[in-house]
Amino acid sequence: MLVGILPTMLLRYAILENYENRAVTVRINDVQNQIKILADHLITYNYLTDTSSEVVNAELAMLSTLYDGRVIIIDQNCNIIKDTYGISEGKTIISEEVMLSMKGQTSSNYDAENQYIEVTTPIIDNALLQKNAEEDDGAPNPDASLASGVMLTSVSTDNIAANVEILQGQATILQMLAAVVLVALAWALSNILVKPFERVTSAIRETKEGFNTEPISVMDYEETEHIITAFNELLGRMKVLDDSRQEFVSNVSHELKTPLTSMKVLADSLIAQENVPVELYQEFMVDIADEIERENEIINDLLSLVKMDKTSADMNIENISLNELIELILKRLRPIAKQRHIDVLYESIREVYAEVDKVKLTLALSNFVENAIKYNSDYGYVKVSLDADHQYATIVVEDNGIGIPEEEQEHIFERFYRVDKSHSREIGGTGLGLAIARNAILMHRGSIKIESQEGAGTSVIVRIPIIFVSK
């Protein structure tokens, strides 16, 4: 509306202003032409010394009537010798315009407030000027008056003002019509242009209230396309998070409930029997203790996972030797590998020191090495190598075990996710180890990469900054 209405207002003002200025200029030029002709007649009829000429008086009256104005004739002594209004004759008039006109200058002035034009024109007798010049030996006198008299003409501009007023009225009507059209057009265009955004808003509201969980599509404009694309990506992320949350709650419930169910079955079995043999009682109690230990492991892993979700403000950073840390981890895990005749190898390319949280990094690397042992074949091997450049330390945990199917690799860091659930049940564990390890590495501003081939083994490549920078 503003883009349409403001230019019409400016155009209206410019047109009216231009018309008025043009009309005044034309009127001034017309009057000056008439006055010059009349000034020649004043000289011809010697009107400045004898105002009785009926021809000149008639012309003066006609000029005054034609332009609805007033004509004053002033002689060289600044005395008014003729006034078409007949009220100032015999008086003396001295003004800047008259003085300048006595020196041969023509001037005009437009008074818009009082609606008249005042034109001051010199009455020049060329023969007299030539005679005076001859008497002065051709040298003009700078103080001498060039004019024999002055004609002071006031011309009414009522008709110009009336025309301007008429034009203003017409312009106002046209502007109002244009405004109505522009308002209607703006309203129609705004509805057309905003409608896709209303559909976007409605779709988002439905999604927020849970009535719609499918991606929305409003591709009318490039802007809505960008908004919808971003929203659908956000919706997809929300679905993933929601599915993950539901799966996590379900898995936690299942994992916590399983040991409790086993303990209840064992306890109920003992209660249901009379005179339970000590050997059977001890066997059941050992099983119950194992289930309690399993429940305790799940709870501890969950607590570790919650701690890992906190910010790096909880990091206890110290500068340690990664070589010594890895050797300590492998020393603890070699007895487990020895039970299945798995060789644990260590290759250190160079001495590496890094700023890390020793407890969290130990937990992460222990998980990687322990998984490499658990999901390996008997008489296999696990190789851990350490190297570094000027920025990052690189730790590779490699095995020749059962490997991970390609379609499963992107899920292995999810909580409670297990590639082979039946086999994992035999091996044990809570399914939280890799999720905990991943969080620990990310808290160090590091990265994890998995390279695996089913039946051929797995390599876990960990990169962490040597110098820890908290964000």
Image: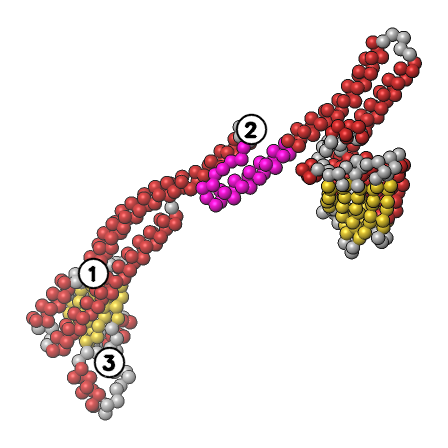
Q: Spatial distance from mark 3 to mark 1, Cα to Cα?
A: 30 Å
Along the horizontal axis of the image, is 141 left or right of 232? left
Residue at x 84% of width, y 26% of height: 293
Task: State which quadrant residue 156 falls in.
Answer: bottom left
Along the horizontal axis of the image, is 298 left or right of 58? right
For badge 1, the amino acid type reads Ser
Q: How crowded is the residue under tag 2: few (<14 C-alpha within 10 Å), some, or many (20+)?
A: few
Residue 79: x and y in percent read 20, 73
- For mark 1, what is the residue? 156
- For mark 3, what is the residue? 145
Whichever of callouts 3 and 1 sits on the residue coming sooner in the sequence is 3
For badge 2, the amino acid type reads Gly
Q: Main secondary structure of the magenta part?
A: helix
Residue 467: x and y in percent read 78, 51
Q: Does the image show residue 440?
A: no
Along the horizontal axis of the image, is 167 left or right of 345? left
**Relative to 369, is 350 above or below?**
below
Residue at x 83% of width, y 44% of height: 383
Residue at x 73% of width, y 42% of height: 452
Q: Spatial distance from mark 2 to mark 1, Cα to Cα?
A: 79 Å
Q: Are marks 3 and 2 in contact (CB under 8 Å)?
A: no
Q: Nearer the viewer, mark 3 or mark 2?
A: 2
The foreground one among 272 and 375 is 375
Q: Secondary structure at mark 2?
A: loop
Q: Nearer the viewer, mark 3 or mark 1?
A: 1
For the magenta stretch, what is the residue range?
214-242
Inspect the magenta stretch and tell me whether residue 425 lies in it.
no
- For mark 2, what is the residue? 210
Q: Spatial distance from mark 3 to mark 2, Cα to Cα?
A: 99 Å
Q: Secondary structure at mark 3?
A: loop
